[in-house]
Amino acid sequence: MCLLYCSLLFTATLATTSMAGNREAFARDVRSDVRRTCLLDMQLPPSAAFITCADLPHYPGAKVLQIGHYPQDFPGPGLLAFTEGFLSGQSTQDYLASGISDWIAVPAPTGDLDQNDDAIQLNEYGVDFLWATRPDEIKREKLRGKDWTGYLWTRRTEPTRKEMGDATPKRPQRCFIALIGNQKNSLEFATCLARDRNPRAPNELHYRDFMRALKSIKFGHWRLPWSP
């Protein structure tokens, strides 16, 4: 009895260790690819299938950063979802001045990005994206990373089913707009994700996982091959 049980336990332990090792190797490969294609370092969210960047022909120097993830526990054909960000290749100041952002109002020239600069706010489209009708319904938080500063905009209260109508998700979501950057690069996201982890769908990318990954970002130019 013990021999059989101990054998099964040993086999399960080896399988768990192997899976953990495979995940770590996979995460290293993804981070290496992120450094190569995005020119930044970013921790892989546990639920992400990949992270990569692609050039945008109409915006020289800009890239779209794409996080591929499964919206359900048992992924299958057509079930891969994407969360995308705009990597401008410009300083935050130049990016805002360019007017490329669909969501953030263009502030008057203020020099370097200042954490106390209240001129950097959402425009009407950004307010609408967060299911709000007035700017005072929006909360702006300051973000700070290893080599960047930025902002996070969310609605102060969760939108109601009446407000969202047919767009109401099955599970609570958090819609947000985030802008981070420094004097060399900037990155903007505008998306909605599940608010918390769903035990029934552990492969789903949720807001908390995403924010941990976002805050881990470090901009830079990286030499390859990369080793941890």
Image (cartoon, rainbow, N blue to C red):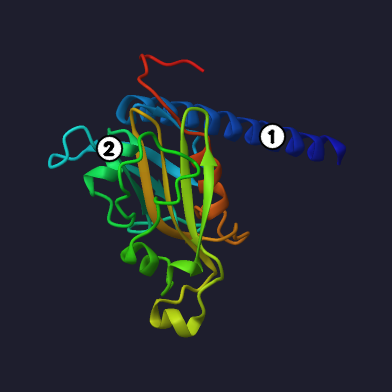
Q: Does 132 appear above or below 183?
A: below
Regarding residue 64, the answer to whether it shows in the image is no
Where residue 64 sits in the image (x, y, percent)?
A: 28, 42
Counting from the top left corner in percent of width and height, residue 114 is at 45, 39
Amino acid type, label 2: Asp
Most extreme residue toward the bottom is: 162
Quadrant in the picture for residue 201: bottom right
Q: CA distance from mark 1 to mark 2?
A: 56 Å
Q: Secondary structure at mark 1?
A: helix
Q: Residue furthest right?
A: 2
Q: Residue 204 versus residue 124: which sits nearer the camera?
A: 124
Badge 2: few (under 14), some or many (20 or more) residues near its Cα, within 10 Å?
Answer: many
On-image quarter of the N terminus: top right
Q: Residue at x 46, y 32 (%)?
A: 148
Question: Can the viewer see residue 24?
Answer: yes
Checking the image for residue 53, the label placed there is: none
Q: Which residue is mark 2?
A: 94
Q: Is residue 192 left or right of residue 18?
A: left
| Residue at (56, 61) in percent of width and height | 195
Q: Residues within 10 Å of mark 1 (few under 14, many from 20)?
A: few
> In the image shown, does 119 or 72 lie closer to the viewer?
119
Among numbered discs 1 and 2, the one appearing first in the sequence: 1
128 vs 50: above or below? below
- Dot 2: element: helix
Q: Nearer the viewer, mark 1 or mark 2?
A: 2
Q: Is residue 65 left or right of residue 218?
A: left
Please provide percent x and percent y for residue 159: 50, 74
Q: Please give the name of the residue rendered at 34% of the width and 44% of the height, measured from the top-left corner.
A: 66
Instruction: Please tell me which residue is depicted at 41% across the width and 37% down the height of the picture.
Output: 113
Q: Nearer the viewer, residue 70 or 77?
A: 70
Residue beneath disc 1: 11
- Amino acid type at circle 1 is Thr
